[in-house]
Image: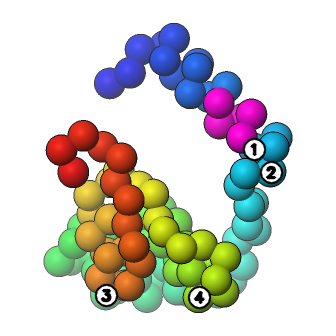
Amino acid sequence: MIDKATLDQLRGLFFSDLAKGRFEVVLLARRHFQNAEALVRTHAVDYALRTLEAMQLSVALELHRRGAASDLVASDKNLCNVAALEGLTVINPSPGS
């Protein structure tokens, strides 16, 4: 858990990075939903992949295929495991990961 002051600081840094163009905003398309559905069918039982994680992974995989993203940064262990299985390099910033 983080306290409110830390949350406010992190939100400020995030929005600052957004304003500087450090993130690419990707609009979701039908293919992202279809790919996410396939990811859930493939990985939900064995790796507890949830729908929103599958959506995030669907977009990350497409960006990776396009050469627009090299790594996935996430701290959710299930998402990290499935991303690695799908061929992404995963960076988990959580301590002990």
> In terms of secondary structure, where does tag 4 sit?
helix
Q: Residue under circle 2?
A: 21
Image coordinates for residue 10, horizontal then vertical, percent: 56, 27
Query: Mark 2 to mark 1: distance in Å?
Result: 5 Å
Q: What's drawn in magenta, residue-wise?
A: 13-17
Query: Mark 3 to mark 2: distance in Å?
Result: 34 Å
Neighbourhood count class around disc 1 (C-alpha, 10 Å): few under 14, some 14–19, many 20 upward: few
Q: Which mark is residue 57?
A: none
The amino acid marked with disc number 1 is: Leu
Q: In this image, 27 relative to 95: left or right?
A: right
Q: Earlier in the sequence, mark 1 or mark 4?
A: 1
Q: Residue under circle 3?
A: 42
Q: In this image, 83 relative to 10: left or right?
A: left
Instruction: Please report the residue visible at 21 percent of the width from the left and 72 percent of the height from the top.
Output: 47
The amino acid marked with disc number 3 is: Thr
Instruction: Please report the residue visible at 54 percent of the width from the left and 73 percent of the height from the top.
Output: 70
> In terms of secondary structure, where does tag 2 sit?
loop
Q: Nearer the viewer, residue 46 or 21?
A: 21
Q: Nearer the viewer, mark 4 or mark 3?
A: 4
